[in-house]
Amino acid sequence: MSFTLPDLPYAHNALEPHIDSTTMEIHHKRHHNLYITNLNNAIESSSLEGLSIEDLCKNHSDNIAVRNNGGGHYNHSLFWEILSPNGGGDPTGKVKDMINSSFGDFNNFKEKFKTAAMTRFGSGWAWLCQVDDHLEICSTANQDNPLMPGICNDSSNPLMGIDVWEHAYYLNYQNKRVEYIDAFFNILNWEEVNNRLK
C-alpha cells in the first residue's frame, strides 16, 4: 500500500500570522507531497513496500531514498499534528511535569530547544523526545529524525519537532530563524505533544 499525503487538521491560513498561508500550502502540497511520491517510487515492488513509516525510519534508514524521503514524510506528518491555531501558552499535563523535572522549568527548556534549532547548521530539525522517564532535546540534519539509529538516543520517542529548513519560514521571516522559532511556540499544540507520550 502506498503512502498518501495526510490532510492538514486546519486550513492553510489558520496559523497566521505565525506561519503564512502561502508557506503552508507550498510546504504541505509541494514539499511534503514530493517526499511521499519519491518514497513510494523507491519502495514499490520491494521488500520495504507495506512497512510502516516508523519501521522504515527505525530499521531501513541505511537506504538513502528511505532516509531522505521516508524521513521527510515522518517528520512533516508529525509537524502538522503538533501545530494548532489554538496552540501556544505553557505546557500542560504530564509533559509539563516532565519538562520541569528534565530541564528545571519551561523557560529553561525553551532556551535549550531554541539553541538546538538555531545552531543546526543548514537544513534540519530540532526535537523534544521522551527517553524512558525523562525528556531530551536533540537536532538532526536534513530529514533525519530521532527514530533513526545513531542520530539521537536510540530509545527516543519524538514528541515534537520544528522544521528549520528555509522552505518552512523564509517567505515570512527571511533569514530571521529566531523569530520563526519564537512564533512556533505560539501555535504549539501541547495536547498533541502529551498524546505522544508513552
Image: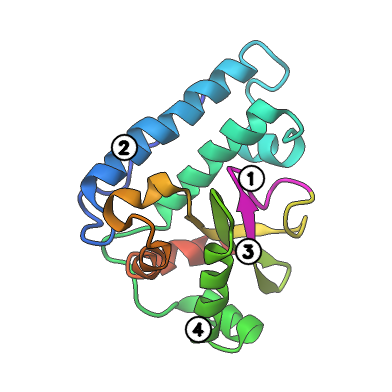
Give the Cα separation between the discs numbered 4 and 2.
32 Å
Q: Which of marks 2 and 1 is nearer the N terminus?
A: 2
Q: Which amino acid does label 1 sit on?
A: Asp
Residue at the (72%, 45%) spot, across then down: 148
Mark 4, residue position: 106
Q: Which of marks 1 and 3 is nearer the N terminus?
A: 3
Give the Cα separation between the discs numbered 1 and 4.
26 Å
> Decide: marks 1, 3 in contact (CB < 8 A)?
no
- Of labels 1 and 4, the one closer to you: 1
Residue 129's disc is 3
Residue 106 x, y percent position in the rendering: 50, 83
Residue at the (47%, 48%) spot, across then down: 165
Snapshot quadrant of residue 25: top left
Residue at the far bottom in the pictured view: 104
Q: Nearer the viewer, residue 189 or 145?
A: 145
Residue at the far front in the pictured view: 175
Q: Which of 113 and 57 is in front in this view?
A: 113
Quadrant assignment for the C terminus: bottom right
Q: What residue type is labelled 2?
A: Ile
- Of labels 1 and 3, the one closer to you: 1
Q: What element carries label 4?
A: helix
Q: How crowded is mark 1: few (under 14 residues within 10 Å), some or many (20 or more)?
A: many
Give the Cα separation between the discs numbered 3 and 4.
15 Å
Mark 2, residue position: 26
Mark 1, residue position: 144
Q: What element carries label 1?
A: loop
Res 1 visible: no
Residue 32 x, y percent position in the rendering: 43, 35
Give the magenta range.
Answer: 138-149
